[in-house]
Amino acid sequence: MWVLLAAIVMMFAALSSVYIMSSEGLSPVGMPRMFLVSTALIVSSSWTFQRAKRSLQRAKTSAHIKWLLLTLALGIGFLMSQLVGWRELARAGVYFKSHPRSTFFYLGTALHGAHLIGGIGLILFLLIRTRKFIFGLEDERHEAWTSVVGLYWHTMDGIWIWLLLLLLIFK
């Protein structure tokens, strides 16, 4: 997981460098207000994931499932709010190819969304493993899997905050 996350972080770092270097002297692109909602959703989802992990450590399986489901819902809500943010950009006349900065908006958020979809798949995987855990199958590794998925999920949260700050600072 560490190698995968290092590659993902490096990809976003390279994309960020290109954005910073190519945006000098260009007119700004307005930040969609929905991106602030997106931020609240993804930060909340990291908190709910931590609650799920804590519930598992305390052997509260039903609470673990509840918190994972809430994390899943917040992750899906994040993706939906991103699409609404894209609509805000389109209504303002900002399209993928209309401006170098708008290209970054779309590309950066799309890449992040694709990686978040991977995280949603991992949470679904955990929910399936939790069912096996309830029935006494593979229980010794469930906590380890939860930690690995949590690491991925929290990294996606951090990358989003980085992208948001980048978009706010270098607008």
Image: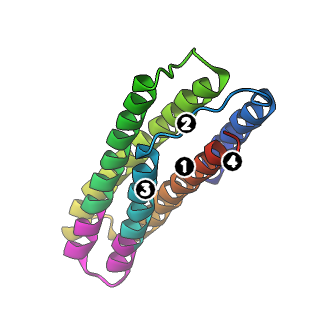
Examine the image and state in which quarter residue 146 appears. Answer: bottom left
Q: Amino acid at mark 3?
A: Ile
Spot occupied by residue 48 in the image (x, y as percentages of width and height) = 36, 68
Q: Are marks 4 and 3 in contact (CB under 8 Å)?
A: no
Q: Secondary structure at mark 1?
A: helix
Q: Is residue 45 left or right of residue 161?
A: left
Q: Secondary structure at mark 3?
A: helix
Q: Specify which label sits upstream in the sequence, 4 or 3.
A: 3
Judged from the image, the secondary structure of the residue bearing numbered disc 2 is: loop
x, y (%) of residue 56?
A: 33, 76
Q: Which numbered disc covers residue 42? A: 3
Label 3–label 1 contact, CB within 8 A: yes
The stretch of residues the image draws in magenta is: 51-68
Q: Residue at x 23, y 75 (%)?
A: 63
User: Which is more foreground, mark 1 or mark 2?
Assistant: 2
Q: Looking at numbered disc 2 in the image, what kind of residue is underneath it?
A: Gly
- The span from disc 1 to disc 2 (Cα, nearest Å) is 17 Å
Q: Earlier in the sequence, mark 2 or mark 3?
A: 2
Q: Is residue 123 in view from this perspective?
A: yes
Magenta stretch: dominant secondary structure: helix
Mark 1 lies on residue: 160
